[in-house]
Image (spheres, grey):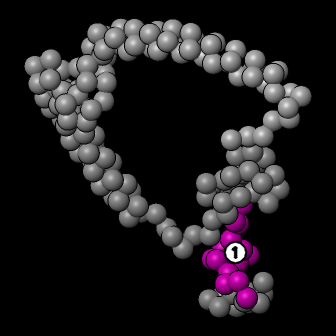
Amino acid sequence: MTWVSPALAPAVGRIVAADGLAGANWGSARDSAFQRAIGNAQRRFNRCARCTSYVCARCWSPEQGLCHNCAPDTAAEAVAAQRRGLNGMASEQDYAQGRQAGRSYDVTTPRQLVCPQCQAETHGTPFCPGCGHRLAAQVRCTSCNSPLPDAAAFRPGCGTRR
């Protein structure tokens, strides 16, 4: 119980009484409207016995008495499974083709993935697609045109100075 000053007691009493009267009228009207809304919703929605969700008529399967999440349409599931199989087979064929193409890919060739001039992605190409800068150019011997090792001062095969 809250203590109220005797001087304020009549005013507080009137506020509490007015609040109680307004609450009594408002509460019953609100409850009645709420019950009507629930009744309207129950006529438009079905309650799934398995998952207890309320679903609209489009998501309801009256034959099974369940929602489509609990009892999906068999024909639709069969078509979806066929599509998954088709996509899986296409993916496997693409993977095999990529493996075949990868056999000719030289992994020892130096590749630069970002252009030092403009910072564009190069995807390992010999020239930058953004600015045309030559990328990852391998140093070659001036006489025999063979690649030079990084730290070599002379070409080991022909002896030409770097």
At a point 51% along the width and 70% down the height, the residue shown is 107
Using residue 2 as the reference point, say whether residue 93 is left or right of it: left
Can you name the residue that lies furthest to the right here? 7
Closest to the observer: 50 or 96?
50
Horizontal and vertical percent position of residue 136:
69, 65
Kindly indicate the quadrant of the structure image that contains residue 146: bottom right
Q: Is residue 78 magenta?
A: no
The residue beneath circle 1 is 140
Helix, strand or loop at disc 1?
loop
Quarter in which the C terminus is drawn: bottom right
Quarter in which the N terminus is drawn: top right
At label 1, counting other C-alpha atoms closer than 10 Å, the crowd grade (few under 14, some 14-19, many 20 or more) is some
Residue range corresponding to the magenta coloring = 133-151
Q: How many numbered marks does the figure carry?
A: 1
Using residue 83 as the reference point, say whether residue 75 is left or right of it: left
At a point 35% along the width and 8% down the height, the residue shown is 40
Prevailing SS of the magenta stretch: loop
Residue 80 visible in the displayed image: no
The image shows residue 116, relative to residue 13, as above or below, that is below
At a point 71% along the width and 58% down the height, the residue shown is 114
Name the kind of residue labelled 1 in the image: Arg
Kindly indicate the quadrant of the structure image that contains residue 112: bottom right
Residue 100 visible in the displayed image: yes
The image shows residue 78, relative to residue 22, as above or below, that is below
Can you name the residue that lies furthest to the left here? 63
At a point 62% along the width and 70% down the height, the residue shown is 110
Horizontal and vertical percent position of residue 60:
23, 20
Horizontal and vertical percent position of residue 26:
57, 11
